[in-house]
Amino acid sequence: FAIGLKGGLALDSADKAQLLAPVAATLALGFITPVLTYGLARVAGKLEVKDAAALAAHFGSVSAVTFMAALNFATRTNIPYEDYMTALLVVLE
């Protein structure tokens, strides 16, 4: 709930034209990563369909805990990031 609320508020205040590229990149990476992983697992790894699909699902999934740890790290080390990054997590999910 908190992730959706924080992301929604950030989206509301963000410049909509500026969001197009990050959202498109997020969607593209969310699609490309598991597809490439599946293909590589089948061809290079010679895995069966179910094993390659399971591996691709792992690489295609998002860890909200890891994401929050990365945001905390960025905040502590003064690395700037956009407020709408939480919304991109939801898009990727």
Image (spheres, rainbow, N blue to C red):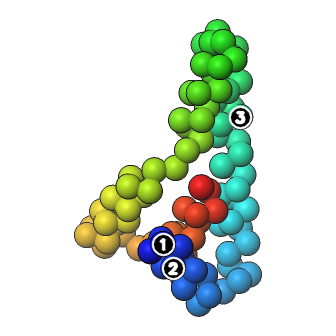
Q: CA distance from mark 1 to mark 3?
A: 29 Å
Taking 22 as reference, is 29 above or below it?
above
Indicate the secondary structure of the residue bearing disc 3.
Answer: helix
Residue contact at pointers 1 and 2, CB within 8 angstroms:
yes
Taking the spot 68% from the left edge, 66% from the top edge, the residue there is 23
Neighbor class of circle 2 (other Cα within 10 Å; few <14, some 14-19, many 20+) is: few
Q: CA distance from mark 1 to mark 2?
A: 6 Å
Taking 7 as reference, is 28 above or below it?
above
Indicate the secondary structure of the residue bearing disc 2.
Answer: helix
The disc placed on residue 1 is 1
User: Residue under circle 2?
Assistant: 5
Relative horizontal placement of residue 36, taking residue 57 as reference (left or right)? right
- Measuring from the top left, give residue 39's x and y in whole percent: 71, 24
Quarter of the image where one finds residue 38 = top right
User: Residue under circle 3?
Assistant: 35
Quadrant of image for the C terminus: bottom right
Q: Nearer the viewer, residue 85 or 17?
A: 85
Quarter of the image where one finds residue 68 = bottom left
Q: Nearer the viewer, residue 29 or 93?
A: 93
Along the polypeptide, which appears first: circle 1 or circle 3? Answer: 1
